[in-house]
Image (spheres, rainbow, N blue to C red):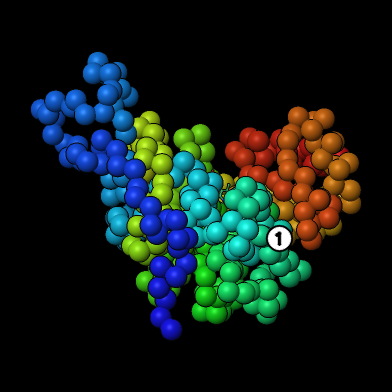
Amino acid sequence: MSFDINNLVRENVKSMKPYSSARDEFEDFDTADMIFLDANENPFQNGVNRYPDPQQSNVKSVLATQNRVSKKQILLGNGSDEVLDLIFRAFCEPKVDNVITLPPTYGMYGVLANLNNIENREVLLSSDFQPKVEQILEVVDACSKILFLCSPNNPSGNSFSDDVVVKLLESFKGLVVIDEAYIDFSEKESWLNRLSDYPNLIITQTLSKAYGLAGIRLGICYASEEIIAVLNKIKPPYNVNELTQQRALERLSEPEKIKGEIKSIMDQRAELLKVLVDVKFVEKIYPTEANFILIKVDDANKRYNELIAKGIVIRNRTTQALCENTLRLTIGTEVENKKLIEVLKQL
Ligand SMILES: *Cc1c(COP(=O)(O)O)cnc(C)c1O
C-alpha cells in the first residue's frame, strides 16, 4: 500500500478551516508604496510595528537554497519545541493514538506526549545507545503515529546507525521524526538528502545549537510538501516573530563564521576527550558526535556538586534510563574548557 498522509491526519485537522490573517490575504510584502490599513497595526514606524511575515519567506528562501529543498518542504516554529508540538497536534488523537520514544533521549517528546494526552510507548535504547528495531516493532500497533529518533542523540551523544534508521523508516507505517539538533557537530550526513526517498520522514533542526541562536527560538522542520501543508494549516499565524526572522537572516548570511565556531567547538571537544581519559573518577567516556560529552563517573551527585562549588554547572543525567552516574558536559570556549580541565584535575 502506498503512503497517504491523509490516513494519519486527525479528523478535526482535516476538516478545519485555518485562520486567515491580514498578511495571508494580502501577502505581497515588497510593495513599499502601498498603504497598509488591513491589520489594525499602529502606523508609526519603529521597526516592529507591523506583523511579521506569517510564512517567513525570506528565511525559508535561504534555508531552501542552503539545504537544496523547496520552500514548501520547510516549516518554521518558535524553537523545535513548537515544531514538535505541532506534529503531535496534527497527527495524534488524544487518548487514542500513541507515539514511540527511545530513552534515554530528549525529554520534550515525553512532555509533549503527556501534554497532548498521547500514550508514550518507551523502548529503551541498547547498551551502546542504538535503537532496538525488533522491540520497537513489537510495541507498534495501528494507532502508533510517530516514532522519535534523536540522532545524534541527547544525552548519549552518538548518532544512530544508517541501517537501523533505514529499517525503521521502511517498516514503521507512521511518521518517523529524526531530530537533528546536533547534526552540525557530526561527520555524518543529514537525512535531508533522503527526504525524497521516504514520504513518512520528518527532519527537525534548530538554530539553537551550532548556529548559536538559542535566544531567538527558531526551529526548522523539513518534510514532504504534503506533510508541511498539514502543519502549516494548524500553526499559529505569526509564530515566528519579526526580530527572530531578522536575526536568523543575518546569521545565515555568515556561514564561514558559523563553520569556524563549530570547528572551534569540535577542537575543544577533542581536547577535553584527551584529558578525560586520565581523570581518575571518570569510568567511561561515551562516543560523541555532538557539542557535549557524556561520561560515567564514580558518583555523579558528588562530582556534580563539587563542580558547582568550583563555579561550573554541568548536567547530571544519573536519573535517566541507562545513564546511572553519568554527567553531561557541554563544550564551551577554549578559556572555559581550560578552567573545566583545571578543576577536573583538582578533584
Ligand atoms: C536542544 C535540543 C533541541 C532544540 O530545541 P529548540 O526548541 O529548537 O531550542 C531539540 N532537540 C534536541 C534533542 C535538543 O537537545
Quadrant of the rendered image containing residue 7: bottom left
Quadrant of the rendered image containing residue 199: bottom left
The x, y position of residue 233, in whole percent, is 37, 51
Q: Is residue 88 left or right of residue 141?
A: left
Q: Who's the residue at 81% across and 50% down the image?
A: 318
In this rendering, is residue 120 above or below 317? below
Q: Is residue 246 left or right of residue 285?
A: left
Question: Which residue is farthest top?
Answer: 44
The x, y position of residue 237, in whole percent, is 36, 40
The x, y position of residue 333, in whole percent, is 60, 38
In this rendering, is residue 292 above or below 119? above
Q: Can the viewer see residue 274 in this picture? A: no
In this view, the residue in front, 293 or 220, is: 220
Q: Is residue 219 left or right of residue 293?
A: left
Q: Quick one: SS at disc 1?
A: loop
Q: Who's the residue at 71% across and 58% down the image?
A: 104
In this view, the residue in front, 63 or 53, is: 53
Q: Which residue is mark 1?
A: 103
In this view, the residue in front, 298 or 236, is: 236
Q: Is residue 88 left or right of residue 22?
A: right
Quadrant in which the N terminus appears: bottom left
Quadrant in which the C terminus appears: top right
Q: Who's the residue at 45% across and 61% down the image?
A: 11
Question: Which residue is farthest left?
Answer: 33
Q: Can the viewer see residue 167 in this picture? A: yes
Amino acid under disc 1: Pro
The x, y position of residue 177, in whole percent, is 52, 62
Q: Who's the residue at 29% across and 38% down the image?
A: 21
Packing grade of label 1 (10 A; few <14, some 14-19, many >=20) is many
